[in-house]
Each structure stands twice: as C-alpha cells, then as structure tokens.
Image: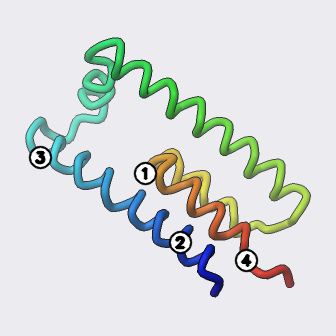
Amino acid sequence: MSPLRMIFLALAIWGAIHPMYYFITWFNQNGYDIMAMVDAWHVNAAASGLVWDLTIAAVTLTVWIIAEVAVRRNWLALIAIPATFCIGVSCGLPLYLFLRTAPVK
C-alpha cells in the first residue's frame, strides 16, 4: 500500500473516531434524541453556517462519488456515501480517496 493510501486510510479512521467521541458524549449528556441534536446544531448562526457548509460538502461529495462510480465501475467506493451521511465528511471523503486510489485491476 502506498504512503498516500495509508494517509487517506488513517484520516478516514480519525474522521470516524474523533467526531463520534463528541456525538456520543453529547448523547450521554442529553439523551439519545436525534432531533434534539439537530436542534443543537442550529443553536446560533455560526453553528447553522457550519451545518450547511458540511451538508453542501456532503452532497457535493456524493455527486462526485456517483459520477465516478458510473465511469470507473468501482462499486465498493459507494460505501463512502453512507459513511459521509452517517459519520461525516471527515470520514467519507478520505475513505472515498482511499478507495479511489486503489490499484486498477
């Protein structure tokens, strides 16, 4: 595995674990209510701006993944879409780059 692929994989793992720590901490303090978390994301204009920034980035990444999978037929790369929306762009983007940089068969 190339050093670049190892970096992408490490970033995907970090992007899965680090944000999840904060989500789980929040759930433990406030209860496991998704809608309450969504409300917390919009507690002020700065937080709402960040939520929209990440949402637009996630949708853009999804369009890119679908467009490239349609051409490259790298079906495994589709796993980056649920990773993006269930974990975050911090996991989905480096995961997709890791999968995309695999040697061509």
Residue shown at 57%/63% (left/top)?
A: 95
83 with respect to 68 (left or right): left
- Compare marks 3 and 2 and give the one earlier in the sequence: 2
Name the disc covering residue 87, or none: 1
The residues tagged by marks 1 and 3 sit, at their Cα atoms, a distance apart of: 17 Å
| Residue highlighted by disc 2 | 7
Dot 2, crowdedness within 10 Å: few (<14), some or many (≥20)?
A: some
| Residue highlighted by disc 3 | 28
Dot 4, crowdedness within 10 Å: few (<14), some or many (≥20)?
A: few
Question: Residue flagged by tag 3: what amino acid is it?
Answer: Asn
- Mark 1 lies on a secondary structure that is loop
Q: Total of numbered circles in the picture?
A: 4
- Mark 4 lies on a secondary structure that is loop
Name the quarter where the C terminus is drawn.
Answer: bottom right
Question: In front: mark 1 or mark 4?
Answer: 4
Question: Residue flagged by tag 2: what amino acid is it?
Answer: Ile
Question: Residue flagged by tag 1: what amino acid is it?
Answer: Ile
Question: In front: mark 3 or mark 2?
Answer: 2
